[in-house]
Image (tube, rainbow, N blue to C red):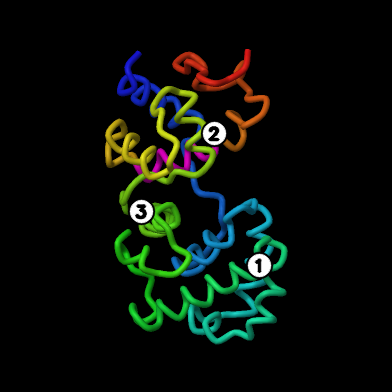
Amino acid sequence: MTPAKTAQAVLARLHTAHPDARYELNWTTPFELLVATILAAQCTDERVNRVTATLFQKYPGGPRALAEADTAGLEEDLKPTGFYKQKTKSVQAMSQALLRDFRGEVPRTVEELTTLPGVARKTANVVLNTAFRLPSGIIVDTHVARVSQRLGLTKKKKPEDIEQELMKLVPQAEWTFFGPALVLHGRYTCTARKPQCPTCALAEVCPRLGVEA
């Protein structure tokens, strides 16, 4: 089966397996999602959600509150997410840049978002796909990269290269669904260790590349 045919079959099965697929970070505003996505680097969404549940209550009102927050206090708040000193620096610098360059509003293009400190293409896609429902690209995290390679949709290693190949295989109208759905599939079924192949919804179309027998 060609990668294009595989992608088509995978997409249909993902719609059945994860019809309401969503990125699992909790948020109420695009700014909150932007902050949460920065904090999710090398940290579980579950832990980030626990931190942000109190963080956004302590610092209400959007970017100004975090931009002007006491750095030591914010570091303490972000400590459970790991790499908290760098994350504090990124969140405050991002908030300051939003106020300075975008009047405190989260921009709606990848090009503008990636001018913000701590925001790379994946983070930009999470915000645009999830908060604005804009098909700016396909979210590629470690789960999407792993599953895409196992399915034979790409041989690339770098997230940016994987995304470019996936965007050629998946219709643009499906980009905002495909990324979150593949994240969920990789997180709960096609796991890094001991993937659940016998019960996998994609088993019939998956060549299981790189999966130990």
Most common secondary structure along the magenta stretch = helix
For label 3, the SS is loop
**Mark 2–mark 1 CB contact (< 8 Å):** no
Quick check: 130 left or right of 5? right
Q: In the image, which disc is placed on residue 84?
A: 1
Quick check: 146 left or right of 173? right
**Mark 1–mark 3 CB contact (< 8 Å):** no
Earlier along the polypeptide chain: callout 3 or callout 2? 3
For mark 2, what is the residue? 185
Indicate which label's residue lies in the foreground, 3 or 2: 2
Residue 140 lies in quadrant: top left
Disc 3 marks a residue whose amino acid type is: Arg
4 w.r.t. 83: above or below: above
Total marks drawn? 3
Q: Which segment is the magenta one? A: 175-184
Residue at image point 49% right, 84% down: 64
Disc 1 marks a residue whose amino acid type is: Tyr
Question: Where does the image place residue 195, in percent across and percent down from the top left?
Answer: 63, 25
Quick check: 34 left or right of 193? left
**How far apart are the alpha carbons under marks 3 and 2?**
20 Å
Question: Where does the image place residue 10, in percent across and percent down from the top left?
Answer: 41, 25
Question: Where does the image place residue 37, in percent across and percent down from the top left?
Answer: 52, 59
Question: Where does the image place residue 143, in percent across and percent down from the top left?
Answer: 53, 38
Work out which residue is located at the far front of the displayed protein and give it. 157
Earlier along the polypeptide chain: callout 1 or callout 3? 1
Quadrant including the N terminus: top left
Residue at image point 30% right, 31% down: 169
